[in-house]
Image: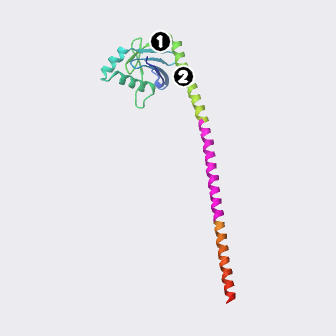
Amino acid sequence: MESPRHSCLKLELPNPTEPDEIEPIFIKATWYDTHFDLSITNDPDSWVCKASEEEVRERAAQWDQPEADYIELAERYLGFQQPGSVYKFTDAENRTKLEWRWKCQPSPNPQQTNSGILNFLMDANIRLSEEVVRKTKSFERLKVETENAWHRVNVSAMRRQSLCLQSMQRCFLLSSFIMGIGNISKQRCFLFF
Protein backbone atom coordinates (compact mmCIF):
# COMPACT_ATOMS: atom_id res chain seq x y z
CA MET A 1 0.00 0.00 0.00
CA GLU A 2 1.40 3.38 -1.00
CA SER A 3 2.07 5.86 1.77
CA PRO A 4 0.77 9.36 1.10
CA ARG A 5 2.91 12.49 1.16
CA HIS A 6 1.52 15.80 2.32
CA SER A 7 2.28 19.41 1.52
CA CYS A 8 0.68 22.75 2.23
CA LEU A 9 1.30 25.81 0.09
CA LYS A 10 0.41 29.38 0.96
CA LEU A 11 -0.21 31.32 -2.23
CA GLU A 12 -0.49 35.07 -2.14
CA LEU A 13 -2.75 35.97 -5.03
CA PRO A 14 -4.32 39.25 -6.12
CA ASN A 15 -7.87 39.54 -4.80
CA PRO A 16 -10.19 39.16 -7.84
CA THR A 17 -12.57 41.88 -6.62
CA GLU A 18 -9.83 44.26 -5.41
CA PRO A 19 -6.62 43.71 -7.45
CA ASP A 20 -4.54 46.00 -5.19
CA GLU A 21 -5.06 43.62 -2.26
CA ILE A 22 -3.26 40.33 -1.79
CA GLU A 23 -5.35 37.35 -0.73
CA PRO A 24 -3.69 34.36 0.93
CA ILE A 25 -4.90 30.97 -0.27
CA PHE A 26 -3.80 27.73 1.35
CA ILE A 27 -3.58 24.52 -0.66
CA LYS A 28 -3.14 21.32 1.34
CA ALA A 29 -2.28 18.39 -0.88
CA THR A 30 -2.14 14.68 -0.30
CA TRP A 31 0.04 12.99 -2.89
CA TYR A 32 -0.11 9.36 -3.91
CA ASP A 33 1.86 7.62 -6.65
CA THR A 34 -1.04 7.73 -9.12
CA HIS A 35 -3.49 10.37 -7.85
CA PHE A 36 -3.82 13.30 -5.44
CA ASP A 37 -6.31 15.25 -3.33
CA LEU A 38 -6.36 19.01 -2.80
CA SER A 39 -8.08 21.02 -0.07
CA ILE A 40 -8.09 24.75 -0.75
CA THR A 41 -9.21 27.68 1.38
CA ASN A 42 -9.09 31.45 1.45
CA ASP A 43 -10.78 31.26 4.89
CA PRO A 44 -14.38 32.15 4.12
CA ASP A 45 -14.56 29.71 1.18
CA SER A 46 -13.21 26.21 0.65
CA TRP A 47 -12.80 23.93 -2.32
CA VAL A 48 -11.71 20.36 -2.88
CA CYS A 49 -10.23 18.54 -5.84
CA LYS A 50 -9.92 14.78 -5.99
CA ALA A 51 -7.79 13.90 -8.99
CA SER A 52 -8.50 10.25 -9.75
CA GLU A 53 -6.01 7.82 -11.26
CA GLU A 54 -7.89 8.00 -14.57
CA GLU A 55 -7.82 11.83 -14.62
CA VAL A 56 -4.11 11.87 -13.82
CA ARG A 57 -3.47 9.31 -16.56
CA GLU A 58 -5.37 11.49 -19.09
CA ARG A 59 -3.55 14.68 -18.04
CA ALA A 60 -0.17 12.97 -18.14
CA ALA A 61 -0.94 11.72 -21.66
CA GLN A 62 -1.93 15.27 -22.72
CA TRP A 63 1.46 16.52 -21.49
CA ASP A 64 3.30 13.53 -23.01
CA GLN A 65 4.60 12.52 -19.60
CA PRO A 66 4.59 9.33 -17.56
CA GLU A 67 2.08 9.51 -14.70
CA ALA A 68 4.86 9.50 -12.08
CA ASP A 69 6.51 12.54 -13.72
CA TYR A 70 3.18 14.36 -13.91
CA ILE A 71 2.52 13.73 -10.20
CA GLU A 72 6.08 14.83 -9.34
CA LEU A 73 5.64 18.04 -11.33
CA ALA A 74 2.27 18.74 -9.74
CA GLU A 75 3.74 18.11 -6.28
CA ARG A 76 6.62 20.47 -6.99
CA TYR A 77 4.36 23.31 -8.15
CA LEU A 78 1.65 22.81 -5.54
CA GLY A 79 4.02 21.97 -2.69
CA PHE A 80 6.12 25.14 -3.00
CA GLN A 81 5.33 28.34 -4.85
CA GLN A 82 7.70 28.41 -7.80
CA PRO A 83 9.31 31.73 -8.74
CA GLY A 84 8.20 32.95 -12.14
CA SER A 85 5.08 30.79 -12.13
CA VAL A 86 1.60 32.31 -12.30
CA TYR A 87 -1.00 30.95 -9.91
CA LYS A 88 -4.63 32.09 -10.00
CA PHE A 89 -8.19 31.00 -9.47
CA THR A 90 -10.92 31.79 -11.96
CA ASP A 91 -14.67 31.34 -11.83
CA ALA A 92 -15.93 28.55 -14.05
CA GLU A 93 -19.73 28.45 -13.79
CA ASN A 94 -20.40 27.59 -10.15
CA ARG A 95 -17.01 25.98 -9.88
CA THR A 96 -13.63 27.42 -9.26
CA LYS A 97 -10.67 26.10 -11.14
CA LEU A 98 -7.02 26.32 -10.51
CA GLU A 99 -5.36 27.89 -13.58
CA TRP A 100 -3.42 24.67 -13.87
CA ARG A 101 -6.78 23.48 -15.20
CA TRP A 102 -8.05 21.25 -12.43
CA LYS A 103 -11.68 21.91 -11.55
CA CYS A 104 -12.27 22.30 -7.85
CA GLN A 105 -15.69 21.74 -6.33
CA PRO A 106 -16.95 23.88 -3.46
CA SER A 107 -16.22 21.92 -0.32
CA PRO A 108 -19.25 20.00 0.94
CA ASN A 109 -18.05 20.81 4.47
CA PRO A 110 -15.99 24.06 4.47
CA GLN A 111 -15.51 23.95 8.23
CA GLN A 112 -14.00 20.47 8.03
CA THR A 113 -11.80 21.47 5.07
CA ASN A 114 -10.53 24.58 6.88
CA SER A 115 -10.04 22.58 10.07
CA GLY A 116 -8.03 19.93 8.18
CA ILE A 117 -5.74 22.57 6.70
CA LEU A 118 -5.34 24.32 10.06
CA ASN A 119 -4.59 21.03 11.84
CA PHE A 120 -1.98 20.15 9.22
CA LEU A 121 -0.31 23.55 9.62
CA MET A 122 -0.36 23.33 13.42
CA ASP A 123 1.13 19.81 13.36
CA ALA A 124 3.82 20.98 10.92
CA ASN A 125 4.57 23.96 13.17
CA ILE A 126 4.90 21.69 16.20
CA ARG A 127 7.23 19.34 14.29
CA LEU A 128 9.35 22.30 13.17
CA SER A 129 9.47 23.70 16.71
CA GLU A 130 10.57 20.32 18.07
CA GLU A 131 13.22 20.06 15.35
CA VAL A 132 14.51 23.56 16.21
CA VAL A 133 14.76 22.56 19.88
CA ARG A 134 16.60 19.31 18.99
CA LYS A 135 19.00 21.09 16.65
CA THR A 136 19.61 23.89 19.16
CA LYS A 137 20.47 21.33 21.86
CA SER A 138 22.69 19.46 19.42
CA PHE A 139 24.42 22.72 18.44
CA GLU A 140 24.98 23.66 22.10
CA ARG A 141 26.39 20.18 22.82
CA LEU A 142 28.69 20.44 19.80
CA LYS A 143 29.75 23.94 20.87
CA VAL A 144 30.71 22.69 24.37
CA GLU A 145 32.60 19.72 22.88
CA THR A 146 34.43 22.05 20.49
CA GLU A 147 35.35 24.45 23.31
CA ASN A 148 36.61 21.52 25.42
CA ALA A 149 38.66 20.15 22.53
CA TRP A 150 40.07 23.62 21.85
CA HIS A 151 40.97 23.96 25.54
CA ARG A 152 42.70 20.55 25.50
CA VAL A 153 44.64 21.51 22.37
CA ASN A 154 45.72 24.79 23.96
CA VAL A 155 46.74 23.09 27.23
CA SER A 156 48.68 20.47 25.26
CA ALA A 157 50.38 23.16 23.17
CA MET A 158 51.27 25.13 26.30
CA ARG A 159 52.72 21.97 27.90
CA ARG A 160 54.75 21.26 24.77
CA GLN A 161 55.96 24.84 24.70
CA SER A 162 56.86 24.66 28.40
CA LEU A 163 58.71 21.35 27.94
CA CYS A 164 60.52 22.74 24.92
CA LEU A 165 61.51 25.84 26.89
CA GLN A 166 62.68 23.71 29.82
CA SER A 167 64.70 21.52 27.45
CA MET A 168 66.28 24.58 25.89
CA GLN A 169 67.12 25.96 29.34
CA ARG A 170 68.69 22.65 30.35
CA CYS A 171 70.69 22.55 27.13
CA PHE A 172 71.81 26.12 27.72
CA LEU A 173 72.79 25.33 31.32
CA LEU A 174 74.56 22.17 30.23
CA SER A 175 76.46 23.96 27.47
CA SER A 176 77.32 26.77 29.89
CA PHE A 177 78.52 24.18 32.39
CA ILE A 178 80.59 22.39 29.75
CA MET A 179 82.04 25.68 28.55
CA GLY A 180 82.75 26.62 32.15
CA ILE A 181 84.59 23.34 32.72
CA GLY A 182 86.54 23.90 29.53
CA ASN A 183 87.49 27.39 30.66
CA ILE A 184 88.58 26.10 34.07
CA SER A 185 90.70 23.41 32.40
CA LYS A 186 92.32 26.04 30.21
CA GLN A 187 93.00 28.19 33.24
CA ARG A 188 94.54 25.25 35.10
CA CYS A 189 96.59 24.33 32.10
CA PHE A 190 97.75 27.88 31.81
CA LEU A 191 98.71 28.07 35.44
CA PHE A 192 100.95 25.05 35.18
CA PHE A 193 102.94 26.35 32.28
| Residue situated furthest bottom in the rendering | 193
Q: Residues within 10 Å of mark 1 (few under 14, many from 20)?
A: some
Q: Indicate the quadrant where residue 84 lies.
A: top left
Taking depth in this image into account, of 125 and 20 the one nearest to the observer is: 125
Q: Position of residue 22 (x, y in %)?
A: 49, 25
- Say which quadrant the C terminus sits in: bottom right
Amino acid at circle 2? Leu
- 152 in the magenta segment: yes
- Pointers 2 and 1 in contact (C-beta within 8 Å): no
Q: Tell me the tag on residue 107.
A: 1
Q: Main secondary structure of the magenta part?
A: helix
Compared to residue 193, the image places residue 110 above or below, namely above
Q: Tell me the tag on residue 30.
A: none
| Residue situated furthest top in the rendering | 108
Q: Position of residue 63 (x, y in %)?
A: 31, 23
Compared to residue 187, the image places residue 139 above or below, namely above
Q: Indicate the quadrant where residue 188 lies.
A: bottom right
- Frontmost of labels 2 and 1 is 2
Taking depth in this image into account, of 183 and 49 the one nearest to the observer is: 183
- The span picked out in magenta is 138-167
Q: Residue at 64% across / 68% down in the picture?
A: 171
Q: Residue at 58% across / 25% down in the picture?
A: 126
Amino acid at circle 1? Ser
* Residue hosting label 2: 121
Dot 2 or dot 1, earlier in sequence: 1
Q: Residues within 10 Å of mark 2 (few under 14, many from 20)?
A: some
Q: Position of residue 85 (x, y in %)?
A: 40, 29
